[in-house]
Image: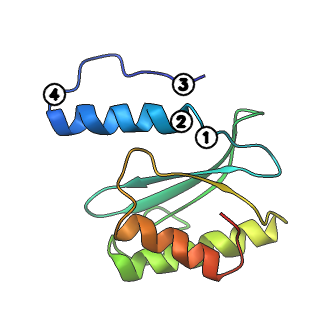
Amino acid sequence: MIRKPLRKAKTLKNAQRQRRKLSIRKNVSGTAERPRLSITRSNKHIAIQVIDDAAGKTLFSVQTFGKSAVKASCNVEGAKLVGEKLAKDLSAKNINNAVFDRNGLRYHGVVAAVVDSARENGIQI
C-alpha cells in the first residue's frame, strides 16, 4: 500500500516530486527474488534501501553515513562507490535481479551513476 503525505507540500517542486513518487510506486513493487532498490539523496549523502514489499521488510541498506558507511560524498564518484558496494551486498545474498525505485528523483547524475555502477558489477536492473 502506498502512503500519501499527511500535509500539503510547501513548494511546487516538492509537490511535483511527490506526484512522480506516487506514480512510480503505483507500478513498482519488490519481492524476495527481485527486491526494490529505493534511493534517497540529499546534498551531502546517498542512501539506498533494498526492500522486499511482499514481506514488508527492508533487507539491508547502503549509505554514505553511519557506522557501516561507504566513505564517499554525494557526487558521481561517491555514487559509483555506493553502487559497487550495493552490487557486492546483493551478490552476497544471491540476488541478481532488482527493481529500481528512483523515489521521484530525475534519472540523472548521481542517481544514474549508482544504477550504472550496480549494472557494471553484475546486477540486472
Are dots 2 and 3 in contact, CB under 8 Å? yes
**Label 4, label 3: how far apart the Cα atoms are:** 21 Å
Q: Is residue 21 left or right of residue 56?
A: left
**Label 1, label 2: how far apart the Cα atoms are:** 5 Å
In this view, 119 is above or below 51: below
Kind of residue sitting beneath label 3: Ile
Are dots 1 and 2 in contact, CB under 8 Å? yes
Q: On residue 10, which mark appears?
A: 4
Please identify the quarter of the rendering in which residue 20 is found.
Answer: top left
| Residue at figure coordinates x 39%, y 44% from the top left | 104
Residue occupied by mark 3: 2
Q: Is residue 89 left or right of residue 107?
A: right
Determine whether the residue tagged by mark 1 lies in a helix, strand or loop: loop
**Label 4, label 1: how far apart the Cα atoms are:** 26 Å
Lower sequence index among marks 4 and 1: 4
**Label 1, label 3: how far apart the Cα atoms are:** 11 Å
Residue occupied by mark 2: 25
Crowding at label 2, few (<14), some or many (≥20) Cα neighbours within 10 Å? some
